[in-house]
Amino acid sequence: MTYKGIIEALKHINGRRRSRILTERDIEVIISEAIRDDYSFASGGEVANAYGYPAIQTTAIAALRSDGDIAFAVGTSNAKKGSCPRPATVPISRLRPDSEAVRANVLAWADNPVGGCVLPFREAIKTLTVVEVSRWYTEAGYAC
């Protein structure tokens, strides 16, 4: 899938909702964090369970695959406080608390992204800003 395809999927999943959604900038951030930190996820926010009616949020997860590409999924999930902030189609039981077990589960999913797609690294790198790229070069010891 291409980055443009991911953004189209995001627009479709956000639909007409105006709250608890993700933006294109949120997608750029989690892709860049996945490149830097192996995986990342984001959600549109939570609500207290005081109302008694269902609430949904847009969620996304990105993870670095062993071949260097990015596994990516975007979808909806329950927005009740304390629920798992991952697309409902992604079979990862928990993303919180952040731990080595969670990291291992996410990276295992990335190599076989059930409920997701694969974004080639060449596409993923296009989402990075000049500031992020120069920071990585600086951290690696290169002069910018």
Image: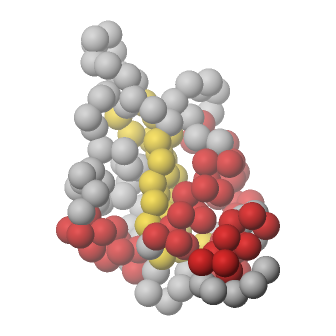
Q: Nearer the viewer, residue 70 or 115?
A: 70
Residue 140 is left or right of residue 93, and the answer is right
| Colouring chosen for the image of the structure | secondary structure
What residue appears at the point 68 percent right and 48 percent down from the top-left corner? 25
Q: Quadrant of the C terminus?
A: bottom right
What residue appears at the point 33 percent right and 15 percent down from the top-left corner? 53
For residue 19, what is the image quadrant? top right
Residue lying farthest to the top in this orientation:
51
Q: Nearer the viewer, residue 34 or 116?
A: 34
Pinpoint residue 109: horizontal percent, then vertical percent.
35, 72
Residue 11 is left or right of residue 99, and the answer is right
Does residue 120 appear anywhere in the picture?
no
For residue 78, what is the image quadrant? top left
Residue 13 is left or right of residue 99, and the answer is right
Q: Is residue 94 above or below residue 36?
A: above
Q: Quadrant of the N terminus?
A: bottom right
What residue appears at the point 60 percent right and 78 percent down from the top-left corner? 139
Q: Is residue 61 above or below residue 12?
A: below
Q: Is residue 136 above or below residue 57?
A: below
Residue 111 is left or right of residue 122, and the answer is left
Does residue 117 appear anywhere in the picture?
yes
For residue 108, what is the image quadrant? bottom left
Pinpoint residue 122: horizontal percent, then vertical percent.
70, 80
Pinpoint residue 20: horizontal percent, then vertical percent.
51, 30
Pinpoint residue 23: horizontal percent, then vertical percent.
65, 42
Q: How many marks?
A: 0
What residue appears at the point 41 percent right and 49 percent down from the top-left corner? 87
Q: Is residue 90 above or below residue 111?
A: above
